[in-house]
Image (tube, rainbow, N blue to C red):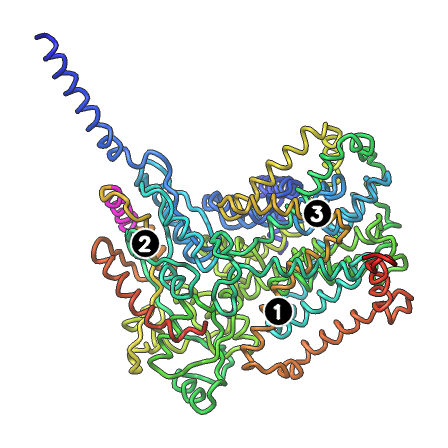
């Protein structure tokens, strides 16, 4: 008879212990540093954003553990993204990328897309612009288009083949009929060199790079923002000229698929706190970016619609 | 400018500079970890510094790193940095012949001269040199790569056939990965780790450092008797030496500055070009590879001269030349500074500090290298059983930290074995390196040029700079014949044919 209460006590104890452990883990998340994988090189825009976020989290003690930025560049972000995709879905590995998660798939650099990842949030976006050299004879987009139509193939665009800015240009060309000849450039500085040296007529940049670009003898002739961008006043948007194209590079954060919901919400909670700090607002200004924070199903829908419009360009990309 | 110099003499920046140069030299000595990596690693720490101190630290590490590779290259034939590979060849040979101090002294002298010359270029010639950088588009870049490729002819030691084979092998191994001109994957054989291709760092460290360590380990008994005696006589080069090597230093500096200004070329290619130019113009080319003093001077002067060169497009146009520059650019951006023409106007103190710290770091580096070499030489006296594992550990760490994945470490090990194999068949390693580095560059630029001209090869005829460089390349190819040596290209090929001829009566 005395065995039963002992048995019951034991059973109760075990139940509490068993139920306590996962709960304790959730309460203690994170109990070790979180790795924020940036699938691009050191010093790039995504890298800087990630480092800013990591620094603010550390300074304001938003999370009990630091967020460490790891650069895993390669294959247009596919290498780093794959590493996150295959990582344990415990919330300790995150990806800081942008629409490259989609374009890498379209180019065949990755055999997966954002569907194989868990969407966490969009954290800021900066729109793309079309620019020519200061010394260029094309003063407006209209001039460029006219020249392009008169002499097909005379307009060369310097771009990073297969990257999001290439897709931005394709989407624009789809609506405008410009169809420039693409010349490969590896990164922004090379695109600037091509423009300044007369090796290409036009190139896509992001508004975040505008500071570097403007002072270097490059003139913006068109923006691809939804409304006139306050960072590029007096520059017409593609929409205002009658071409319904909008392209903005969006900072997207993902986690491995199957990351538990409470960890996802812990992360989005931390991101929201970072977003609300005055330092982050300053950084957004500095990078000429729209401060946007999109989470949850709204974010998942956004990713899906961007994926659809980018994938629609796949037949335009030479392969 | 004077303000910047004075600022650097105040305690805090001075200390930062000293630490930076020391760290840079240490990182330069250790194979596997490069100055660029260290700069990326300290980047987060620079947030908490003022922008002038941050750039001082980064530039000091940069300068120390470029120079530090000399030490292990000379004393152990292990390049601490890729740009020290050419120094390995002759530096170690001279050291083994009993003059390690002289080898190190010459390398050090070359380093300081190259650095100071490039500083002058930075201060006096930045705007025109920057214009040169812009004028180089795809066709011009292609032409200059062809010039460098022609150097294989003069670097192949005895057998040009083996040299070309090594170069082709190197080029082939650079193909897997992303084809930048179409934005698609190729030759990864379904193995996703190859998606990013084989990174230059693990390949070079494996080929030169790991293979050397393995080879030495297999010969460990012989090693103890052959060991480079720590005889540091001759470490301070006399003025006469500076005079004797003056033309070499001047020419190599110019090569280094030019290669530094052109984005994407870098110190490694600069030291290769400088080495081979020196060899072609030398009165004693057969000495090269056996301990030629000219070779050491040429290689070290050029690689330090690129430091000033790369800063030119960075400061004037905001265009980074390579990885180290990209980190510098990132640091400036984080501190709210936008490199470009406006930086001179908006933040002159930062620009002046960068320029001043470049010169000061070189001076500090020279002093440290001269003193520090004695210390390092002592370390060489330690048992190989301690040194080799340490080196290997650092190689692995460096390879891993490069892209934060283990694949690169495996690549390094694999190339260690490849390096041993190549040495066994007496295939020259330098052409392999050239093929690996320059092959993809040539392909990339040629295809970009063709994209730009719409498939028209004749476009190159309309571009004077590119055409001029191609003519130079042609001259280089014909150089052995023009030089009047009996061993021209046809002769070299013929000898090899004899060697592989089947024996008479054989099956």
Which secondary structure dominates the residues rendered in magenta? helix
Q: Chain of mark 1?
A: B
Task: Give residue A116's mark.
Answer: 2
Q: Closer to the camera, A298 or A209?
A: A298
In the rendered image, which quarter contains the N terminus of chain B? bottom right
Q: What residue did someone put label 1 on?
A: B133
Q: Closer to the camera, B504 or B90?
A: B504
Callout 1 secondary element: helix
- Whether the magenta-drawn stretch holds residue A268 is answered as yes
- Is there a contact, CB below 8 Å, between mark 1 and mark 3? no
Q: Which residues are magenta?
A: A263-277
In the image: residue A57, left or right of residue B413: left
Spot the residue most to the bottom. Answer: A150
Give the CA distance from mark 2 to mark 1: 43 Å
Q: What residue did someone put label 3 on?
A: B421
Q: Residue at x 75, y 76 (%)?
A: B471
Q: Closer to the camera, A264 or A16?
A: A16
Residue B464 position (above or below residue B206): below
To which quarter of the image does residue A4 belong?
top left
The image position of residue A274, as x and y in percent, is 30, 48
The image position of residue A302, as x and y in percent, is 25, 62
- Whether the magenta-drawn stretch holds residue B24 is answered as no
Say whether residue A43 is visible: no
Q: Are marks 1 and 3 on the same chain?
A: yes
Q: Residues within 10 Å of mark 1 (few under 14, many from 20)?
A: many
Give the CA distance from mark 2 to mark 3: 42 Å
Give the CA distance from mark 1 to mark 3: 39 Å
Say whether residue A111 is visible: yes
Q: Chain of mark 2?
A: A
Callout 3 secondary element: helix
Q: Closer to the camera, B314 or B148?
A: B148
In the rendered image, which quarter contains the C terminus of chain B? bottom right
């Amino acid at each position: 008879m005395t065995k039963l209460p002992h048995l019951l006590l034991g059973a109760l104890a075990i139940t509490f212990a068993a139920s306590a452990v996962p709960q304790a883990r959730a309460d203690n998340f994170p109990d070790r540093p979180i790795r924020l994988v940036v699938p691009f090189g050191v010093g790039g825009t995504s890298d800087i954003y990630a480092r800013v976020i990591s620094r603010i989290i550390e300074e304001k003690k938003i999370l009990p553990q630091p967020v460490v930025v790891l650069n895993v560049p390669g294959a247009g972000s596919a290498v780093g993204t794959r590493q996150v995709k295959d990582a344990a879905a415990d919330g300790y590995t995150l990806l800081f990328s942008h629409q490259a998660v989609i374009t890498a798939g379209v180019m065949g650099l990755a055999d997966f897309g954002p569907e194989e990842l868990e969407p966490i949030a969009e954290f800021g976006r900066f729109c793309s612009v079309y620019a020519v050299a200061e010394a260029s004879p094309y003063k407006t987009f209209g001039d460029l288009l006219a020249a392009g139509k008169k002499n097909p193939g005379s307009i060369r665009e310097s771009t990073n083949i297969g990257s999001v800015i290439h897709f931005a240009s394709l989407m624009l060309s789809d609506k405008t009929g410009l169809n420039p000849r693409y010349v490969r450039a590896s990164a922004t500085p090379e695109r600037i060199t091509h423009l300044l040296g007369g090796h290409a007529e036009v190139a896509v940049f992001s508004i975040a790079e505008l500071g570097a670009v403007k002072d270097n003898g490059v003139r913006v002739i068109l923006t691809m923002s939804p409304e006139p961008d306050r960072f590029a006043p007096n520059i017409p948007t593609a929409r205002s000229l009658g071409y319904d194209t909008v392209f903005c590079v969006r900072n997207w954060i993902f986690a491995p698929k199957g990351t538990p919901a409470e960890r996802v919400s812990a992360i989005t909670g931390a991101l929201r706190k970072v977003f609300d700090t005055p330092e982050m607002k300053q950084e957004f200004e500095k990078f000429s970016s729209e401060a946007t924070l999109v989470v949850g199903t709204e974010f998942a829908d956004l990713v899906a619609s961007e994926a659809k419009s980018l994938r629609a360009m796949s037949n335009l990309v030479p392969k | 400018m004077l303000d910047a110099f004075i600022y650097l003499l105040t305690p805090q920046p001075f200390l930062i500079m000293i630490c930076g140069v020391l760290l840079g030299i240490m990182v330069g000595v250790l194979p596997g970890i490069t100055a660029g990596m260290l700069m990326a690693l300290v980047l987060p720490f620079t947030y908490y510094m003022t922008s002038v101190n941050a750039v001082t630290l980064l530039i000091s590490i940069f300068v120390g790193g470029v120079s530090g590779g000399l030490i292990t290259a000379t004393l152990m034939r292990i390049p601490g940095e890729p740009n020290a590979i050419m120094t390995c060849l002759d530096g170690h040979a001279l050291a083994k012949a009993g003059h390690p101090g002289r080898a190190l002294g010459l390398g050090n002298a070359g380093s300081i001269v190259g650095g100071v010359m490039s500083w002058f270029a930075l201060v006096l010639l930045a705007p025109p040199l920057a214009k040169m950088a812009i004028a180089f588009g795809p066709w011009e870049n292609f032409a200059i790569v062809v010039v460098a490729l022609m150097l294989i002819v003069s670097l192949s030691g005895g057998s040009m056939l083996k040299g070309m084979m090594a170069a082709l092998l190197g080029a082939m191994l650079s193909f897997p990965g992303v084809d930048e001109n179409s934005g698609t994957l190729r030759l990864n054989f379904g193995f996703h780790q190859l998606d990013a291709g084989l990174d230059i760092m693990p390949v070079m460290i494996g080929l030169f450092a790991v293979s050397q360590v393995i080879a030495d380990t297999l010969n460990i008994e012989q090693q103890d008797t052959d060991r480079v005696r720590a005889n540091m006589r001759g470490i301070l080069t006399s003025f006469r030496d500076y005079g004797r090597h003056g033309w070499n230093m001047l020419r190599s500096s110019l090569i280094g500055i030019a290669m530094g200004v052109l984005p994407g070329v870098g110190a490694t290619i600069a030291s290769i070009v400088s080495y081979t130019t020196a060899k072609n113009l030398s009165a004693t080319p057969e000495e090269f590879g056996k301990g030629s003093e000219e070779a050491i001077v040429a290689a070290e002067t050029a690689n330090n001269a690129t430091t000033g060169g790369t800063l030119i497009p960075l400061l004037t146009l905001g265009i980074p030349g390579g990885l180290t520059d990209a980190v510098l650019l990132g640091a400036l951006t984080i501190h709210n500074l936008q490199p470009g023409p406006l930086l001179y106007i908006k933040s002159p103190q930062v620009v002046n500090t960068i320029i001043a710290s470049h010169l000061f770091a070189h001076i500090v580096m020279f002093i440290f290298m001269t003193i520090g070499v004695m210390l390092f030489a002592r370390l060489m006296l330690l048992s190989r059983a301690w040194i080799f594992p340490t080196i290997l550990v650092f190689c692995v760490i460096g390879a891993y930290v490069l892209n934060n994945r283990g694949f690169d470490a495996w690549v390094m090990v694999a190339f260690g074995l490849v390096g041993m194999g190549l040495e066994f068949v007496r295939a020259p390693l330098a052409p392999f390196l050239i093929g690996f580095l320059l092959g993809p560059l040539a392909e990339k630029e040629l295809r970009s040029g063709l994209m730009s001209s719409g498939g028209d090869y004749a476009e190159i005829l309309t571009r004077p700079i590119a055409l001029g460089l191609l003519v130079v390349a042609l001259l280089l190819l014909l150089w052995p014949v023009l030089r009047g040596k009996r061993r021209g290209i046809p002769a070299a090929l013929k000898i090899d044919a004899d060697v592989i001829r089947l024996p008479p009566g054989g099956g």
